[in-house]
Image (spheres, helix red, strand yellow):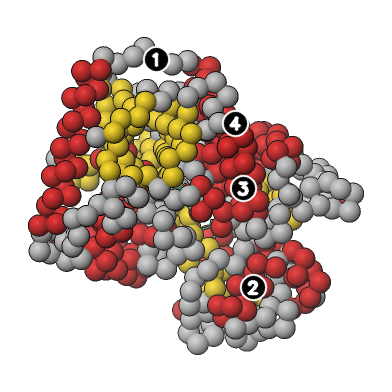
Amino acid sequence: MRIEDFDVLVVGAGLSGLRAGLELSKKWNTAVISKVFPIRSHSGAAQGGINAALGNLEVGKDDTPKGHAFDTVKGSDYLADQDVVMFMCEEAPKIVIEFESMGAPFSRLESGLIAQRPFGGAGFPRTCYAGDRTGHALLNTLNEQSIHNGVKFFDEYFLLDLFKADGRIAGLIALDIAKGELVSFRAPYIILATGGFGRIFKHSTNAMINTGDGVGAAFRAGIPMQDVEFVQFHPTTLYGTNILITEGARGEGGYLFNKKRVRYMKNTAPKAMELAPRDIVARANEIEVIEGRGFENAYVHLDLTHLGADRIKERLPGIREISIYFAGVDPIEEPIPVQPGQHYSMGGIGTNVDGDYGETEIAGLYTIGECSCLSVHGANRLGGNSLLETAVFGRYLGRKLLERGLPKKIPSRDILAAEEKVLNNTLTLFKSWNENLGKKPVEIRNEMGEIMNKNVGVFRTHDNLQKAYDKLVLLQKDFQNVHVSSDDWKFNYGLIRTLELRSMLDIAEATTFAALWRKESRGAHYRWDYIKRDDENFLCHSLIYRGKDGLEMRIKPVKLGIFEVKERKY
Ligand SMILES: Cc1cc2nc3c(=O)[nH]c(=O)nc-3n(C[C@H](O)[C@H](O)[C@H](O)COP(=O)(O)OP(=O)(O)OC[C@H]3O[C@@H](n4cnc5c(N)ncnc54)[C@H](O)[C@@H]3O)c2cc1C
């Protein structure tokens, strides 16, 4: 087996991984490992923008980081940890200016300042953007900077499992997808930045690569999943394909209509209307359909026609293309058919209550970005806060580790023993997958996606969740006997899909388990059988571990602060 030695390993080349890698490579021998070429990471798909209280528009001139923090905490339905939110919002203007100085091509106001648009749940227009391709602009900027700074990239390497030695993280085993070779990467620090896991649902705005491999690897190593019951359903995904139609479309002034041509958001959020937080708008869209006011019993209309051709072409060119190609609708002339779809995971790899942000229960193992739960989004994320989170905590963690310095070396015999154990487990697993005669991975994956879509969606009940949970437990059993047809490991995408499925099943099971446990409605988690928020019993984070007899739930307090817990009104 090939061995690679580094000071620090970053798994993931999206915005969070690249920003951490960039910082660390200033002093340390840093490797960034990614299962896809860095600029194919899912961050590149981000459309609408990144939040920062810059106050560049006249109507936004009174905006402040504190106002941004307040909106974020209220949007989170008070489940976000207020210290970490405050830190993120204070760093936001600096992070956006840093991107600008690296050359990110933001859209501009006539004054030359970075343009900002209104987004859901925000008191001021604070979302900075590059047309409707913000993620693409930022990801390419960071990728260029990382190459310039000498980050060592391992593209198309797939993280399999982590190993510990001497009581701390010591490395990971990865598959070199092209060569079909197992490689041991050793390092005293590992940062998991492997992105979201929306693909546990059949319909999602996420790319096929968003399968939660980092969450799964951490979970298998004993790190809990935190707050995974909170799944964001974006209110406006294209009917049928569920491709995202950015909140920026409503930020630019788009309206939602039902088939009676009523702007129904006036009933749910009379002040914020279409720019209420996503959980609220998604539920309102679903209700229109459930109560018979949707089109074809399936979708509502997002109308941009009144914005005019020039504005749509300038600010939303990607949305126009998507609507024309995938729905045959030109938004300059006709409304876009939209429905809610899985979009973002507020939960993820559990992090410590105290200590550095992103620190896990295993010494030396950290996590940032969408795969992590640093608890900045609580029960519902505000649009534009995720791109922000990736860069703020990527930079923060890079700086923290450099400050901390490298720990003393672990004796190599301990590393060898740990490495060998994971290697042997991997070989045994691959062999059994070839020999098994059970279902194909795609069959299990499809069933899992259907179950999640049908039972763990925008509206939930005990019965549906229980049904989903029972079926997922059976699918876990099926997976024990999964069949991979080829034993050639080179570019073996049957094998890769199976490895992904291993983590996805754990996450789907944990999500459903946590949703069953949380007997209240908060943010994106809405239960028909418990329609009220219950601060007395559930103002806490969920932590799920795999125990000897199945999943186990523990709880962790929410860090409250200057913003009083109140009922949300928009
Ligand atoms: C369509 C869409 C539009 C969005 N628009 C916005 C927006 O406008 N504003 C906003 O704030 N947020 C937006 N979001 C959310 C935001 O884009 C993401 O949350 C964020 O970009 C995630 O970044 P990340 O660095 O955590 O992960 P990603 O960018 O997803 O990167 C994950 C990395 O991990 C690697 N990886 C994964 N598994 C493995 C493995 N097994 N081995 C090796 N490498 C692995 C991948 O190769 C990849 O490099 C949007 C999301 C979607 C789906």
User: Which residue, given by chain and number where applicable, does mark 3 sit on?
Assistant: 140
Sequence-wise, the earlier of marks 4 and 3 is 3
**Mark 3 packing: few (<14 Cα in 10 Å), some, or many (20+)?**
some
Query: In the structure shown, which secondary structural element does the residue marked by tag 2 occupy?
Result: helix
- Decide: marks 1, 2 in contact (CB < 8 A)? no
Q: Position of residue 485 (x, y in %)?
A: 18, 62
Sequence-wise, the earlier of marks 3 and 1 is 3
Residue drawn at point x = 79 percent, y = 69 percent: 311
Sequence-wise, the earlier of marks 1 and 2 is 2
* Cα distance in 3D space between marks 1 and 4: 24 Å
User: Relative to 205, does residue 128 appear above or below in the rendering?
Assistant: above
Which amino acid, by three-letter code, is at mark 3? Asn
**Mark 1 packing: few (<14 Cα in 10 Å), some, or many (20+)?**
few
User: Which residue, given by chain and number where applicable, does mark 2 sit on?
Assistant: 321
Q: Residue 407, labelled with which disc?
A: 1
* Cα distance in 3D space between marks 3 and 2: 21 Å
User: Which residue, given by chain and number where applicable, does mark 4 sit on?
Assistant: 149
Query: In the structure shown, which secondary structural element does the residue marked by tag 4 occupy?
Result: loop
Whether residue 26 appears in this view of the structure is yes
